[in-house]
Structures are given as structure tokens and as C-alpha cells.
Amino acid sequence: MGSGSSDDFQKAKDYADAVISSKGDISIPYNKLWDEAGENNKDFIFTVQYSLNSIADVQKDGNTQSSLFASYGGSAGLGMKRSTETLIPAYQIHHSFQQNDERYAYDFMWYTYKPYFNYYNPDGTEQVMYYNPVIWDPNKTELTAADSAQYIQEVKTMTGRDLASGFLLFPIWKNDRQKYAEQAWGGTSGRVPGFKKFDCPENALNSTLEYSASVRDIVLARLAGTYFLKAEACIALNQIPEARDLVQKVIDRPGNKIDPNGTDLTNALDNATDQQSALEALFLEKGKEMLGEYDGRWPMLRRTKMLKYMLEKYNVDFEKNGITFQDKWYLRPIPENAITLNEGLTNDDQNPGY
């Protein structure tokens, strides 16, 4: 565990309790929490506000968060959402989720229409451009022609739409790290499902033309994050059962189970026996709940001294590219302009290793 006194961790718990008391229990279903109409709901604590009516250029003056975490969808003329082809979701994200988890079902665009934003306002003319079904069977090792035919029929039945010219089928290998990685590292559009959590139907047309057309608010802090922050402080105080119960409250959000009578969602902290295993479990659970959000994951890994452990265990780039962890990554480089513009700094003040 990182540096800090027991008093500091107790104070963190106290501050978290104050926020939780002021906000109430976690009560908004996940799909309502992130619906565009749900901006400024009571779960959100601090957001960067955007409005279509207050920006000068509706094509370029928004933010880019809706363009992240997807494989490029084609040219603007195809009516597909502009995506930056960066930060492709890692294998562990798909591997961690259970089939009955509404958060997993909601976050990704499992079938993609052409035009893209007709998903939100279908008019009957849209066609299916991509389909990314999840292969849940851990014993499945190959995709047969019969499998492909079944998936194609499945998406046509599910949507009631025809396949677009150039339709692509890319199942997600949830239980095969190497197969998922090879697919994700490829260069074909639609090879992984689009990330729709931050989509901006309000400015749909411009979001097919420019990466920075989203006017969705950027959420920097929310109630579930406060529960995780308190759980982290509990782990630092070696109060692992209390940390487990806090995470369970997030998992038990209303509607998190697609089928209320189906399989219960597991809590990784159930198996935690010490601080390191509890922190690892906390990061896995927080990753599912706060996927793609600006929740300070790097600072969290850094302050808990878990950055090296988590990168080496879960970051497939280490294996793919033969990366060796460097201690300098516990700090980030000071931008050159910051040194140049600050008379009190010189290049000698740069963080070690940069």
C-alpha cells in the first residue's frame, strides 16, 4: 500500500461518508445514469458542462470523448461515428464481465447501424454494418462457417434489418486472450464493438464528420467513485470486509442484473485475503463500473504502489512488445513548455528518467 498515515485514510473515509450522506444510496439504473437525457443526475458530483446552444462551432467546439475506445468506422461519407482508432479496449475488460451484467450490455455497440446514429432514432432504412457477438463458451476455440451463418441470422432477427454492403462480423473472444488481442491489434474497421457510453445523438450529424463534435458532459466525479475511494481507504486500514461491502453496494445498483432472476454478479473482493489481493480486486471491479471514465486510474495505481503489478499482469502490450516496467512511470514528465515558462524551473528539475 502507498504512503499515508492511518489518520489520513480515516479522514478520506470521513469525507467519503459526507458525500455519500449528501447524495443518498446508489439508486439510478446504469442505463439511465448514462442516457443522454440523464445528464446532471444526482449521482454526478462534478462534470465539465457542454451545451449545443453555447458553442460557436457545432462541428468542432465540443469534446472528443465519444470518439474514443472504438475501431475506426469508415469515412464520414458512410455516416459512421468518427472514431480515433486509439485506446482499443483491452482483453481484460471483456474477460471480466459476466453475461448477466447490464453494464457490459449497455457500454458497447454490439451491432452497428449504417448510418451509425440511427441506432437511437431508427427510421427503418438503416442497415447493419458490424456485428460483434460475445463468445461466452470457454471451450469454444474456433469459428466455423456454421457459427458465422448463425450469427448473421441472429443479428438480422434481432434488428429486423438487412446487412449493409461491406458488412463485417467480428465475434469477441471473451475467454481467449490471444485471439482477442490479434483481432484488436488488426486494422479492420469494426473489429471490436464501438463504445457507446458517451455517444452524442444530440449532435449526431456533426459527430459523423468531426472527432470533437460531442456535447455530452464529461463526468469527472460521481457517487460510485466515492464508494470505491472509501473502499480504497478501508483497504489501507486493513478493513477488507468493509471495503467488500462498499463495492457490493455498487454491484447491487438497481437493474445491474439483466435478468433479475438470473446469475448473481460476483464481487472480486469476496476472495481477497490481504491488501494486495484486495486492491487488485478493487481495480477490477472499478474498471467495470467506471469503464472509460476520467476517474484517475493512474494516480490510484500510483499512490497504492500497484502500477507495476497491474501493468505486468493485465497489460497485453507488455507481452506483445516485450516491455519492461520502468520506475520512472510512477511520475510523468513535466511538459517542456511548463519548464520554459516557469522562471523557477530548469531542465534539471525534470522528473527522473525523462
Image: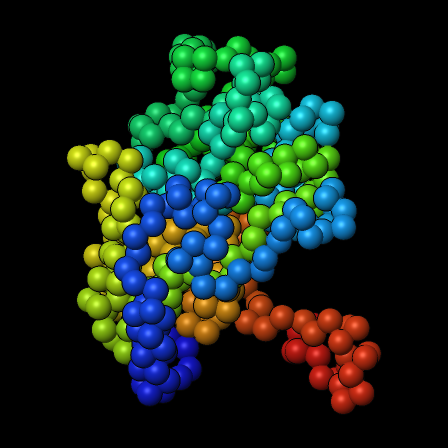
From the viewer's side, name the closer residue of 78 and 24.
24
From the viewer's side, name the closer residue of 267 and 177.
267
Q: Is residue 317 above or below residue 257?
A: below
Q: How many labels sit on residues? A: 0
Q: Is residue 261 left or right of residue 212?
A: left
- Furthest residue toward front: 53
Q: Is residue 254 above or below residue 81?
A: below
Q: Quadrant of the C terminus?
A: bottom right
Q: In this view, does 250 lie above or below 187?
A: below
Q: Is residue 21 left or right of residue 50?
A: left
Could you tell me which residue is drawn at 51 percent across and 57 percent down?
219
Image coordinates of residue 50 in percent, x first then y, are: 62, 53
Could you tell me which residue is drawn at 34 percent across and 39 percent down?
102
- Furthest residue toward left: 261
Image coordinates of residue 293 in percent, x first then y, are: 50, 54
Could you tell me which residue is drawn at 25 percent across and 75 percent down?
238
Is residue 37 among the parts visible in the rendering? yes
Visual colour scheme:
rainbow
Is residue 112 among the parts visible in the rendering? no
Q: In which quarter of the image is the N terminus?
A: bottom left
Give the image quarter of residue 177. Answer: top left
Image coordinates of residue 13 in percent, x first then y, are: 32, 76
Q: In this view, does 69 lie above or below 314?
A: above
From the viewer's side, name the closer residue of 341 and 236.
341
Could you tell me which residue is drawn at 76 percent across and 50 percent down?
56
Give the image quarter of residue 176. Answer: top left
Image coordinates of residue 168 in percent, x first then y, are: 56, 20
